[in-house]
Image (cartoon, grey):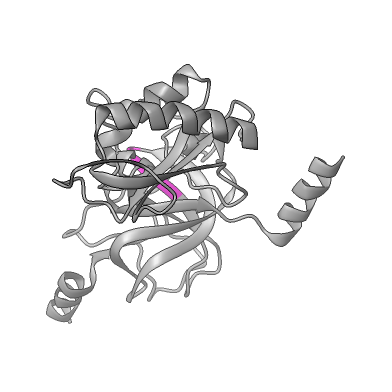
Amino acid sequence: MQNTSEDRQQNEGETIAPLSTPSSAPSSAPSSAPSSTPSFTPPFTQPLTQPLTQPLTQQGDITPTNHLMAGAGARVLLPVVVPVLEDLDFTLVRMRLIGADMGAAPKGKSTKNAKKVLQIMAENKEGTLTLGECETISRALSALLDVEDLISGAYALEVSSAGLERPLTRLADFETYKGARVKLKTIRPIISNDKARSRFQGILCGIENDELLLEVALENYSAPQVLGFAFSQISEVILHPSAAEISNLLNTLKD
């Protein structure tokens, strides 16, 4: 049986286990991650609301969440785009270059008929973005990107707000939105309760020991379990408000 488990792990992805096992869980439920995949912290002993006391490792402008903020094709643009937005008192939420090939095509200008699309998702200090602010960002970035010539060929620039189901991409986001309902997608399938899965839903519990903590409902457990995900495992995290939460927010905006 052990060999079968190891074979599955190699074929389907990494193994995941709760950081702690409730006393009500049946004996057949896993209580800790196998020794071959030491990806998770020891059982939680302190409140999940405890603030982050030690910063995550950072090397210059590189953080563990850069891959969440910008896709592979757009990541080279971070040192250019982020300062422009900051000078305008905006914050980058996420950037994607669709149809990206940062290659050897001749220099082009921004055009609506382009095959490549640079998508910029940003927010102001209130966490929103007006149409006028989108236009301000678009003008500033278009001029600079054409001068820097970082995108080969013609491209279209799209600037938008993050919306209700906004992605969480910065380290601060995972503390700011602690307690919110989120959807999480992993880069590779993870084995949880003997099932390979790459999508999880649950309550965001912040960060601990360089891992994102998510409280999820698992089969064979009578109570929700807290799972830890290394940032290198994560493909995407987005807010997932309930219908009632969305309705309350819309009513607040109307008032």
Q: Residue at x 41, y 30 (%)?
A: 141
Residue 56 visible in the picture: no
The N terminus appears in which quarter of the rendering?
bottom left
The C terminus appears in which quarter of the rendering?
top right
Look at the picture and state if 58 lies above or below 191. above
Q: Nearer the viewer, residue 119 or 31?
A: 119
Q: Residue at x 59, y 30 (%)?
A: 133
Look at the picture and state if 87 lies above or below 35. above
Q: Is residue 202 magenta?
A: no
Name which quarter of the figure residue 77 lies in: top left
Q: Residue at x 55, y 63 (%)?
A: 223
- Please state the extent of the stretch shown in magenta in the rendering: 209-213
- Image x and y of residue 45, in percent: 44, 42
- Image x and y of residue 250, in percent: 78, 49
**Dominant secondary structure of the magenta stretch?**
strand
Residue 34 visible in the picture: yes
Q: Residue at x 33, y 37 (%)?
A: 209
Q: Nearer the viewer, residue 52 or 89?
A: 89
Q: Residue furthest top?
A: 87
Name which quarter of the figure residue 143 lies in: top left
Left or right: 67 as drawn, with respect to 241 = left
